[in-house]
Image (tube, rainbow, N blue to C red):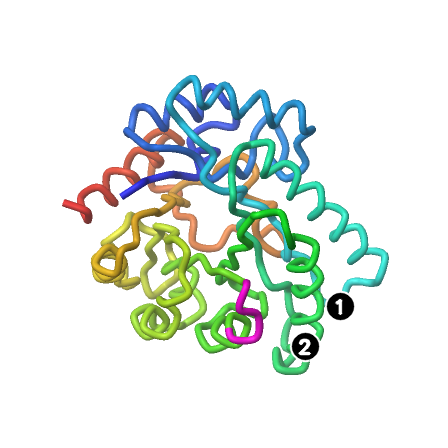
C-alpha cells in the first residue's frame, strides 16, 4: 500500500511537511496548501522546484488536492470562466509537480434546492473540465463532499455513469457526515474508485482516527486491497490547521474536535491509526 497524506495538516511549510511524512514513513503528499497558499495556484517554476526537493527526499506528489469544482453551480458566467482558467493552470501545475491526478468536486448546490434541478448544469460544467484535460494524461478524481452535487452515493454514481473518463476518490467520513451508509456507498462505487481518502467519523459528524468511527474504514480498506487497490491518502482532520476555513462552504469547520494538542500529534495519530488497520 502506497500511503500519502495531506501533509499541510502537519505544517504549512514544505520543510515541515517533509519532516512529518518521513517521520511516518509515507511515500508522498496529496498537495493542497504550501508556501502560504493553495498549491493549485503555484507558479510553475516553484512547482518544479518542489518536485525536485521532494524527489531528493524520496517523496512524490501523489495528487494535486485542488479546490476545483468547489464553487457555486449558480455562479455567473464570469465566475465559471475564471474557474476554468484556474483549472487549466492546475493541469500545468500537476504536470510540473510530477503528478498525474487532480482531486476535484462537483459544485456546490444552492442550499435547500433540489440537487436534481442542477444535474444538467453540473454535467455541463464538469464536461468542460474533462474536455480541458483531454490529452494531458491527468486523471480527474471526483471526491464526495458535503454540499456538492455528488455528496451521496447515488449522485456520485450518476456522475460516473454519465462521464466514463471521470475517476473517483472515496472519503468515508464525508459520506458519514452526509448521512450516507459508507458500506452501501462502497458497494455501489468501488469499481470506479481510483484511491481512498482515509478519514473516519462518528454519527455526530465528528472526525476521528481511522477505525474509530462508523465509516467502515477497516472493511473498505480490506476490500480495496483484495481488489488490487494499492494507494490511499491520509486526511487527518483531527485538529484545526492553517487553511481549513477555505475547505468548506462559508468557512465551516464541521467535525473538527481539536482533540490533539499540536498539528504534529494529530497528523501522527491519523497515520498510526491507518497503519494499525493495515496490520
As drawn, the residue found furthest toward the front would be 135
Closer-to-camera residue (189/238): 189
Residue 99 is one of the magenta-drawn residues: no
Dot 2 surroundings within 10 Å: few (below 14), some, or many (20 or more)?
Answer: some
Looking at the image, tell me whether mark 1 or mark 2 is earlier in sequence order: 1
What's the residue at 56%, 35% (across, down)?
33
Q: Quadrant of residue 93?
A: top right
Residue 164 is one of the magenta-drawn residues: yes
As drawn, the residue found furthest toward the right would be 78
Percent x, y of residue 135: 63, 51
Closer-to-camera residue (115/133): 133
Residue receiving disc 2? 118
As drawn, the residue found furthest toward the left would be 279
Local SS, label 1: loop
Q: Are marks 1 and 2 in contact (CB under 8 Å)?
A: yes
Percent x, y of residue 169: 44, 57
Closer-to-camera residue (214/222): 222
What's the residue at 62%, 56% (across, down)?
249
What's the residue at 61%, 78% (across, down)?
115
Dot 1 surroundings within 10 Å: few (below 14), some, or many (20 or more)?
Answer: some
Residue receiving disc 1? 74
- Quarter holding the N terminus? top left
Separation of residues labelled 1 and 2 (CA atoms): 9 Å
Q: Which residues are magenta?
A: 161-165
Local SS, label 2: helix
- Quarter holding the C terminus? top left
State the predominant SS element of the stretch in magenta.
Answer: loop
Amino acid at each position: 500500500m502506497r500511503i500519502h497524506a495531506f501533509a499541510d495538516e502537519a505544517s504549512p511549510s514544505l520543510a515541515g511537511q517533509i519532516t512529518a511524512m518521513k517521520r511516518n514513513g509515507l511515500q508522498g503528499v496529496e498537495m493542497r496548501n504550501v508556501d502560504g497558499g493553495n498549491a493549485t495556484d503555484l507558479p510553475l517554476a516553484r512547482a518544479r522546484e518542489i518536485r525536485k526537493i521532494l524527489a531528493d527526499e524520496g517523496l512524490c506528489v501523489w495528487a494535486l488536492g485542488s479546490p476545483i469544482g468547489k464553487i457555486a453551480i449558480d455562479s455567473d458566467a464570469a465566475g465559471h470562466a475564471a474557474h476554468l482558467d484556474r483549472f487549466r493552470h492546475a493541469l500545468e501545475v500537476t504536470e510540473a509537480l510530477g503528478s498525474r491526478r487532480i482531486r476535484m468536486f462537483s459544485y456546490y448546490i444552492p442550499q435547500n434546492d433540489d440537487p436534481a434541478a442542477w444535474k444538467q448544469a453540473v454535467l455541463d460544467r464538469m464536461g468542460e473540465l474533462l474536455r480541458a484535460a483531454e490529452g494531458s494524461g491527468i486523471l480527474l478524481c471526483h471526491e464526495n463532499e458535503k454540499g456538492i452535487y455528488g455528496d451521496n452515493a447515488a449522485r456520485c454514481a450518476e456522475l460516473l455513469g454519465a462521464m466514463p473518463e471521470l475517476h473517483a476518490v472515496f472519503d468515508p467520513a464525508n459520506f458519514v457526515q452526509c448521512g450516507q451508509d459508507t458500506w452501501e456507498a462502497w458497494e455501489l462505487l468501488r469499481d470506479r474508485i481510483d484511491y481512498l481518502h482515509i478519514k473516519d467519523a462518528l454519527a455526530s459528524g465528528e472526525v476521528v482516527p481511522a477505525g474509530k468511527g462508523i465509516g467502515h474504514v477497516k472493511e473498505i480498506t480490506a476490500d480495496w486491497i483484495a481488489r488490487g487497490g494499492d494507494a490511499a491518502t491520509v486526511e487527518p482532520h483531527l485538529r484545526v490547521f492553517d487553511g481549513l476555513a477555505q475547505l468548506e462552504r462559508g468557512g465551516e469547520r464541521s467535525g473538527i474536535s481539536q482533540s490533539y494538542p499540536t498539528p504534529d500529534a494529530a497528523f501522527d495519530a491519523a497515520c498510526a491509526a491507518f497503519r494499525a488497520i493495515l496490520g
